[in-house]
Image (cartoon, rainbow, N blue to C red):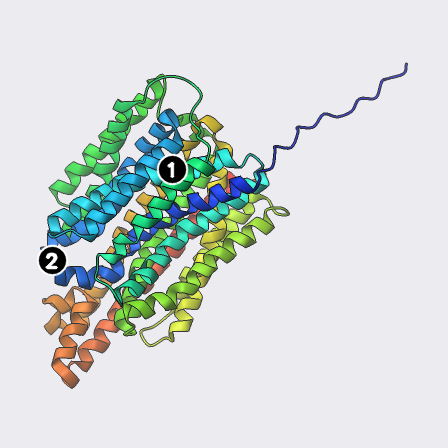
Amino acid sequence: MATTPTTPTTEPEPPRAGARAWAGLAVLLLPALLVSMDISVLFVAAPALAAAFDPTAAQWLWMMDVYGFVMASLLIAMGGLGDRIGRRRLLLAGGAAFGAASALVAFAPTAELLIAGRVLLGVGAATLAPSTLALIRGLFAHPGQRRTAVGAWTAAFSGGAVAGPVLGGLLLEHFWWGSVFLVNVPVMAVLLVAAPLLVPESRAPEGGSFDLPGALLSLAALLGTVFAVKHATEYGPDAAAALALAGGLLGGVLFVLRQRRAAHPLIDLSLFGNPAFSAAVAANGAVSLAAAGMGFLAFTYLQVVHGLSPFWAAVWALPTFLGTVAGVAAAGGLVRRVPRGAVIASGLAVSALGFTGIAMVGPTSPVPLFIGAYIVVTLGVGAASSLANDLVLGSAPRERAGAASAVSETAVELGNALGIAILGTIAAAVYQGTMREQAPAAADGAPGQTVAAAAEQAAAMGEAGRGLLDTAFTAFTQGMNAAALTGAGVMAVVAVFSALALRGR
C-alpha cells in the first residue's frame, strides 16, 4: 500500500527587528546605565558629602543605603504595575520622577532633604529597571536578536556600577558634589522625548486590577528582610533585627499565600517550577552578591592601601567593565555551539576563579595584578548574567515579562545589599581581629574599626605611624581575601546548581 509522503512542519521563524527597534534599545539602555550607576556614584562623592553636611552616623548610613533599600523593596510591585498599566507608561513616569529626584538631591541644602531625594530616586529606579528589560521582550521577538539586546542591557546595567565612580571622579575634579546627580537630568529628558517615538507600548493582555494587597505584602517582606540584614550588620543581631526579620518572613509567607489565591497575581509562582527560571534568578542573585560586595571593598583597597585618588582608582577599575563586555560577547558566541546551561555554569566558575585570584593578593601586590584577577571575575559575570537575563525573559510568558523581570531584578538588588552586608562584615571582622592581635593599642579606637581611620592617624603620627599603617593595610587585605574566598564559594555552589538545573536544556 502506497503512502503519501508528508512534509514535516516547522515553526515559522519569529520576525527580525529593524533599525527602529535597535534605536529603541539604545534609548532603553540609558536608564539601565543610570540605575546601577547611582548605586556606586557615592563611593567617590563620599568625602565631599561628609564635608558639606557633617552628617550623623545614622544619616550617613541612610545616605549610602536608602537608594538600593527602596529600589529592592519596590521592584516586584512596580513590575506587576507595569504589566497592568503599560510598561512604557510606567517607564516614562519613573523617568520623570528619577530626573526630578536627581535635581532635588543635587541642590539639597540639608542631609534630611538629600536622604528624601535618595528615597525618590529609589522609587524612580524601581520603575525603570523592570520596565526596560520587559520592553526589550516586546521589541525583539527573534531569539538571537533578543539575546544580543539582553546582552547589551546586561553590559549597561553591570557597567553602570563601574561608570559611576569614573564619571563621579571626573565631575568632582571640576564641579561640586551635586554634579554627580545633576548629570541624570538631561539623560532622563532624552528618555522622555525619544521613548514615545521609538518604543511601542506593551502590557499584559488580560483584564483585571493591580494586586495592591500583594504589592503591600511584597513591600513588607522585602523591607523587613533587608532592614534586618543591614541593622544586624551595623549593630549586631539584636532584638530589632530579629523583629524585622520575623516581620519580613511573615510578610513573605502571606505574599505567597496571596499570590496563590489572587485572580491576577503579581507573580505567577508556577514560574519557579521551571528549572530554567529558578536557575537564572539564582545566578543573578549570586553574581550580584559576590560582585557588589567585592566592588565595595575594591575601591577601598585601591584608594587607601594603594593611595590612588578617587578618579584614578576608577580609571584603574575601568578595564573591569571591558571584562563584562567581553563576557557578554563570549557568551553570545558560545551559546550557538554549547548548551546555555553549560555556558552559565562556566561563567560562574570563571568568576569563582577570579575571586580566588583576588584572595591571593597582598597589600604590596601590584595594582595590575589585582585588576587582572578582577577582570576574570567580570568576564564570568558578563557571560553568566547576560544568558541568565535572557532565560528569565524566554522562560516567562510574554504577558508576564514585567513581573518576571522584576523578580530577577529583585534578586539582583537583594544580592547587592546582602553582598555589601555579608562580605563587608566578613572583611571587617577579620580586620578588627587582626588589629586586636597585632596593634592592641590602636584596636579600641577608630583605627581598629576602619583602615581609613588607621591611615589618617598614621599620617598624623609621621614616621612613628609607619608600623600602624603596615599593620592596618595587612589586616584590611586579609579581610578582603576572606571576603573574596566567600565570593568564590558562592559562585562555585551556584555554578553546580545551574549546571544540574539546566542540564540538557
- Circle 1: residue type: Pro
Camera-side residue of 71 and 237: 71
- Mark 2, Cα crowd under 10 Å, few <14 / some 14-19 / many 20+, is some
The answer, for residue 324, to whether it is visible in the render is yes
| First in sequence: mark 2 vs mark 1 | 2
**Left or right of 267: which side holds 399?**
right
Camera-side residue of 334 and 156: 156
Write down the residue under mark 2: 53
The answer, for residue 283, to whether it is visible in the render is no
As drawn, 129 above or below 432: above
The answer to which quarter of the image holds residue 264 is: top left
Q: Residue at x 19, y 34 (%)?
A: 246
- Circle 2: residue type: Phe
The numbered dot on residue 130 is: 1
Q: Residue at x 26, y 64 (%)?
A: 172
* Quarter of the image where the N terminus is located: top right
The CA span between labels 2 and 1 is 33 Å
Camera-side residue of 76 and 206: 206
**Left or right of 120: which side holds 239?**
left
Extreme-right residue of the structure: 1
Q: Nearer the viewer, mark 2 or mark 1?
A: 2
The secondary element bearing badge 2 is classed as helix
